[in-house]
Amino acid sequence: MQPSRILPDLQASLLCEEVRQEVTGNFFLLGIVGVIRVPQVPVTAFKLCVFNRWTAGVGTFTESVRFIGPDGATVLRQSQVKFTLHDASHHAVNVTVFGQVEFAAPGVYHLEVLVDEVMKLRSPVPVVVQPPPGAPPPANKAP
């Protein structure tokens, strides 16, 4: 008996600056992000991409990708996409592009990946204020 539905595994999920696909179907991920270092806040990221690869499932599913603020509750960006796996030996790749993501404050943001409302990944994305080398120290502000 063939199963009609098996929830897939999230084989890979990476936050990066750019995802490109060549004519052979292979993907290039550029600027894989582990921490976001900025000279000051607020700052706006022109584009952030999330590369997800699903496998070992059967059926039609809804992938949700959410970018959560440092308070743990504010959803800065959210995306949903449907995908189908016809056989457990197949895979599906989804690329989510978030444009103009504003980071109002430093802190630990989170990237969440869900399939059919089941959390598969919650990954921290620290935003750190780090002045460029050689920059003068910040001026003391009067109270």
Image: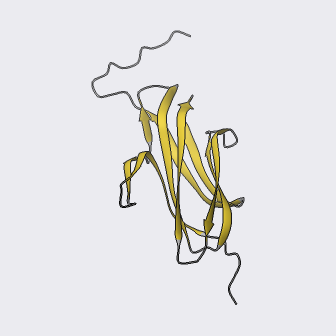
How many discs appear? 0
Question: Where 87 sits versus 126, above or below?
Answer: below
- Indicate the quadrant containing the N terminus: top left, top right, bottom left or bottom right: bottom right
Residue 27 in percent (x, y) is at 39, 56
Residue 106 appears in the figure: no
Residue appearing at x 70%, y 42% in the figure: 73
Residue appearing at x 54%, y 40% in the figure: 98
Q: Camera-side residue: 2 or 133?
A: 2
Q: Camera-side residue: 72 or 101?
A: 101
Residue appearing at x 68%, y 38% in the figure: 74
Question: Where 119 sits versus 7, above or below?
Answer: above
State left or right for residue 72 relative to residue 140: right
Furthest residue toward top = 142
Residue 24 in percent (x, y) is at 36, 61
State left or right for residue 132 relative to residue 70: left
Q: What colour-coding does the image apply?
A: secondary structure
Residue 57 appears in the figure: yes
Question: Where 143 sits versus 79, above or below?
Answer: above
Residue 79 in percent (x, y) is at 63, 46
Q: Camera-side residue: 128 or 48?
A: 48
Furthest residue toward left = 134
Question: Where 13 sits versus 38, above or below?
Answer: below
Residue appearing at x 45%, y 14% in the figure: 140
Residue 112 in percent (x, y) is at 61, 52
| Quarter occupied by residue 2 | bottom right
- Indicate the quadrant containing the C terminus: top left, top right, bottom left or bottom right: top right
Furthest residue toward front = 23
